[in-house]
Image (cartoon, rainbow, N blue to C red):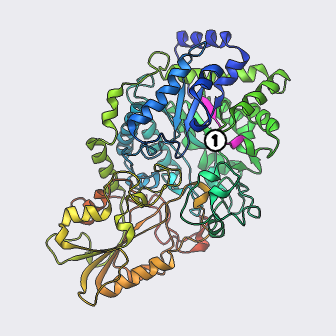
């Protein structure tokens, strides 16, 4: 059972500070706007407790030094407030400091789950924390401890595994890496364990995030009047994405019983709290029809009282707004009384502040509940040592994207690859052998390798951040003269190749924008594979994806098949294993479905490739 992270002296300090605070200063600590919706002057005047950068909430130009300058400007503003309470700046550093151009981008969690390597994840957590702290940030909205049950879900890649024990083990390892020498070290980063709870158990078709009829004529998300969806830039039109299944399951309703919730989805939270986590993020989703942001039983009775959580609960982005759509004051009252302590507003902070003030003065939110929320936030800030060292060492900037961290990411990539077929031992590829044909645009695309949550919310194609593509890695390892490349697989009549390597990938996506009704390869991808198959004696397929895709019908035409997940910036790690410099050691941490009838996952499903022990 977790105990207070503070000494008796520190607890008295928090109590004394709380006693000095005005009502407005208390409300300020609960308020977390997005950096594009707030000024440093407002941070000072309103005594705000936190600011965040949402996906793509970056300085211009996007450099590590500019990140630090931006964050420090907000921190200095907080320190200039009447009580000088330091700011807690938050970011989505979910696979490295992934919003920062030039940072090391590690494999997404689904790949780390395949490594089965807690020490590796711990070292990744430490490297990530160093790069995050270098920019002045001390809070990351990670780790996700989801247990995905339906891989049509666009957040499946944020889950380590479908095995709660493995998820618990790796989440604890990441938390230990974030902590480093201690929470009060200036390079410790507060983890946000998310999304409480059972976000990955939602039922297909239960999401109400998007009014599909109202959005039917919207061609692009940025044409929507929805401020959040306007940030979701993707190559396909919004109408087309809705037809493909976007926003069908993310933020939906988990209709499971409580026994399943406790047995499958709650254990990683218990493990994280025992490891010292001081922040939990509430889920957008519902449980049995009640929004988690209003779920007093789970947020207060279970998380805080039963599990003894002493930290604070933060809402997700505009999460409270969904409780009673269009009735904002009711949303605020329901969320705070249920157990939300800090609200990710993120746009209109004055509306939130005014609403809380009215509710407290009107008796709808008890003063004791307000004080409890503030105490929890201050407790985390004291535990992080923010009052002693609110500013991190600018010399840390030299660690952002450094060689040592990229070597660690390369190691992680190599350990994450899973060989699912290798007829005739075609792999590893041989140095000095005949020319190898490499095909597919995705073989030479760092942005695709990284996937969503990379520089922008949805991620994107192309050189979005410095890195090494799989093609570049193969050329480096085998030699440029042994690697022939065709982006589209369109070849002259001669020659025929002994081995062809085709890299195919999912388009980058995040959250509900990545929900898909069908997980098959596209017609263009199948045609590419056919063209290369016709010109090669043996075919190797490398799949970049945030989840297992349905490849049962195509698999017989492939001699070798490798799941490379979303490896991040270090594509050389893929080449290291394909070429035999390192062995295949990754093991499936998800069931690989045979067909669409296996979705969602069921106990009686016969997986094409079952999750490995």
Q: Is residue 4 visible?
A: no
Q: Nearer the viewer, residue 145 or 398?
A: 398
* In the image: residue 409, left or right of residue 30: left
The foreground one among 456 and 382 is 456
- Residue 135 rendering spot, x and y as whole percentages: 42, 33
| Residue 154 included in the magenta stretch of the image | no
Look at the picture and state if 223 lies above or below 598.
above
The region drawn magenta spans: 311-320
- Secondary structure of the residue carrying tag 1 is loop
Q: Residue at x 46, y 36 (%)?
A: 175
Query: Residue at position x 66%, y 9% from top?
Result: 20
Quarter of the rendering containing residue 156: bottom right
Q: Residue shown at 57%/32% (left/top)? A: 51
Q: Residue 369: image x %, image y %?
A: 74, 24
**In the image, residue 460 lies at what x, y percent?**
47, 58
On the rendered image, what quadrant is the N terminus found in? top right
Rendered location of residue 154, percent (x, y): 57, 58
Residue on which disc 1 sits: 316
**In the image: residue 195, left or right of residue 134:** right
Task: Please say whether residue 26 is visible from this viewpoint.
Answer: yes
**Residue 85 appears left or right of 385:** right
For label 1, the crowd category at 10 Å Cα-Cα, with few meaning under 14, some 14 to 19 and many 20 or more, is: many
């Amino acid at each position: 059972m977790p105990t207070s992270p503070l000494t008796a002296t520190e607890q008295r300090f928090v109590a004394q500070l709380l006693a000095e605070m005005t009502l407005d200063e208390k409300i300020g600590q609960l308020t977390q706007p997005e950096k594009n919706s707030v000024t440093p002057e407002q941070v000072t005047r309103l005594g705000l407790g936190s600011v965040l950068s949402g996906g793509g909430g970056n300085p211009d130009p996007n450099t590590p030094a500019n990140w630090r300058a931006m964050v420090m400007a907000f921190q200095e503003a907080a320190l200039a407030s009447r009580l000088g309470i330091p700011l807690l700046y938050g970011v989505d550093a979910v696979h490295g400091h992934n919003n920062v151009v030039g940072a090391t981008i590690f494999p997404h969690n689904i790949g780390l789950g395949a490594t089965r390597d807690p020490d590796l994840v711990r070292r990744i957590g430490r490297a990530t924390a160093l790069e995050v702290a270098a920019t002045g940030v001390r809070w990351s909205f990670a780790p996700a401890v989801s247990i995905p049950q339906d891989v049509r879900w666009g957040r499946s890649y944020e889950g380590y595994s479908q095995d709660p024990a493995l998820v618990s083990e790796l989440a604890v390892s990441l938390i230990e890496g974030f902590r480093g020498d201690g929470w009060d070290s200036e390079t410790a980063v507060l983890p946000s364990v998310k999304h409480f709870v059972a976000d990955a158990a939602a039922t297909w078709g239960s999401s109400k995030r998007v009014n599909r009829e109202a959005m039917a004529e919207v061609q692009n998300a940025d044409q929507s009047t929805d401020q959040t969806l306007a940030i979701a830039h993707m190559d396909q039109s919004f109408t087309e994405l809705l037809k493909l299944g976007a926003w069908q399951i993310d933020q939906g309703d988990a209709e499971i019983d409580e026994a399943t919730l406790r047995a499958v989805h709650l254990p990683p939270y218990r493990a994280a709290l025992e490891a010292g986590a001081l922040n939990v993020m509430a889920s957008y989703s519902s449980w049995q029809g009640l929004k988690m942001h209003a779920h007093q039983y789970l947020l207060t009775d279970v998380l805080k009282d039963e599990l003894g959580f002493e930290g604070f609960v933060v809402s997700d982005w505009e999460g409270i707004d969904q409780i009673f759509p269009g009735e904002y004051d009711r949303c605020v009252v329901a969320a705070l009384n249920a157990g939300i302590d800090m609200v990710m507003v993120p746009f209109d902070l004055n509306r939130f502040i005014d609403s809380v003030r009215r509710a407290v003065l009107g008796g709808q939110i008890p003063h004791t509940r307000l004080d409890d929320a503030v105490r929890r936030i201050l407790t985390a800030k004291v535990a992080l040592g923010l009052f002693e060292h609110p500013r991190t060492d600018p010399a840390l900037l030299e660690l952002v994207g450094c060689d040592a961290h990229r070597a660690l990411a390369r190691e992680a990539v190599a350990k994450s690859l899973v060989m699912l077929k290798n007829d005739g031992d075609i792999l590893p590829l041989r140095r000095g052998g005949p020319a190898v044909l490499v095909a597919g645009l995705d073989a030479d695309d760092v942005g695709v390798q990284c996937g969503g949550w990379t520089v922008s919310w949805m991620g994107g194609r192309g050189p979005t951040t410095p890195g090494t593509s799989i093609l570049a890695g193969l050329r480096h390892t085998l030699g440029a003269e042994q690697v022939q490349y065709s982006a589209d697989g369109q070849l002259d009549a001669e020659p025929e190749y002994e081995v062809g390597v085709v890299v195919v990938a999912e388009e980058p996506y995040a959250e509900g924008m990545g929900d898909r009704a069908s997980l098959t390869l596209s017609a263009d991808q199948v045609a590419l594979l056919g063209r290369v198959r016709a010109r090669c004696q043996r075919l190797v397929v490398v799949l970049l994806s945030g989840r297992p895709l349905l490849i049962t019908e195509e698999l017989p035409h492939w001699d070798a098949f490798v799941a490379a997940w979303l490896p991040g910036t270090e594509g050389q790690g893929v080449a290291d294993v394909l070429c035999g410099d390192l062995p295949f050691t990754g093991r499936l941490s998800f069931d690989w479905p045979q067909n669409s009838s296996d979705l969602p996952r069921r106990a009686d499903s016969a997986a094409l490739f079952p999750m490995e022990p």
